[in-house]
Image: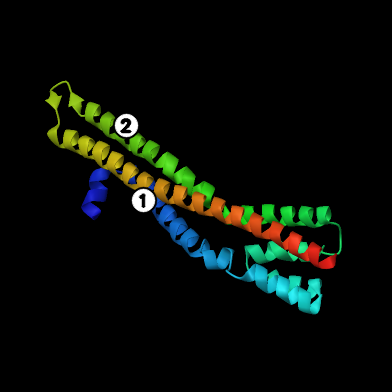
Amino acid sequence: MFSILQAAGWPIWFLLLASVISVALIIERAMSLRRGKIVPPGLLQAVVGEYRQSGDGEAIAARLETHSPLGRVFAAGLRNVKSSREIMKESIEEAGRAAAHELEHFLTTLGTIASISPLMGLFGTVVGMIEIFGSATGGGSNPQQLAHGISVALYNTGFGLLIAIPAMIFYRHFRALVDGFLVEMEWQAVKLVELLHEERK
C-alpha cells in the first residue's frame, strides 16, 4: 500500500485526506439519519393521547425537546396550542426549518467531496504529465522518470474516481432520506394541529 502511495506522488495525500473525511461523514450520517431517531413510530398518537389526558402542553413539550427532531417540532406546536391555528402552524414551521438544517448537517461537505475528488485526481494527472514531459531531455528520455510520471497520472485519476463515486452515491441517498423525513414530519405536524384544535372545539 505504501509503495502505491509513493508511486502516486504527493498529490495523492490530498485525496487520502478527502477519503478519510468522506468515510467519517458517511458513518456519522448513517448513524444519525435512522428513522427511529428522526420520526419515531407512534409518537403522534402518544403525544395526542397524553395531551388529552393531562392537558399540560408545556410539560409534554419539555420532554419532547430532547426526544427527536419530530419531537422538537411537536414541542413547538404544543407550546402554542392555546393560540390560534395560524400561530401554532407558524411555530411548527420555524421548528421544522431548524430540524431540516440539523438533518442536512454535513451533507454539503459530503457533496463537495464527491464533486471535487475527480478534480483533485485530474490535478494529480496534470502533475504526472508535467513530470513525463519534464523527463524528456536533449539526450532523450529518462525511463524511470517517465514511468513515475505515468504512475502519478494514473493513480491519482483512479483514486479521485474511487472516492467520488461512493461519496456521490451516499450523498444522493442521504439527501433522499432527509427529503422523505421532512415530508413525513410536515404531514405529522399538520395532523397534530388538526387533532389538537379539534379537541379544543
Q: Nearer the viewer, residue 8 or 37?
A: 37
Look at the picture and state if 146 lies above or below 59. above
Using the numbered discs, state the Cα–Cα distance from disc 1 to disc 2 in whole angstroms. Answer: 18 Å
Q: Position of residue 95 (x, y in %)?
A: 71, 57
Q: Position of residue 163 (x, y in %)?
A: 36, 47
Is residue 162 among what the camera can see? yes
Indicate the quadrant where residue 118 lies. Answer: top left
- Which of the labelled discs sits on residue 126, or is there none? 2
**Please, which residue is most extreme toward the top here?**
138
Q: Amino acid at mark 1?
A: Leu
Mark 1 lies on a secondary structure that is helix
Circle 2 — which element?
A: helix
* x then y, percent, for residue 46: 67, 74
- Residue appearing at x 27%, y 49% in the figure: 5
| Residue most extreme to the bottom | 53
Q: Residue at x 81, y 75 (%)?
A: 56
Residue at left offset 72%, top offset 53%: 93
Which is more N-terminal, label 2 or label 1? Answer: 1
User: Within 10 Å of the Cα at label 2, are there few (<14), some (14-19), or many (20+) other Cα atoms?
Assistant: some
Where 43 falls versus 116 (above or below)?
below
Please say if 182 is above or below 192: above
| Residue lying at 61% horizontally and 71% vertically, measured from the top left | 42
- The residue to which callout 1 is attached is 16
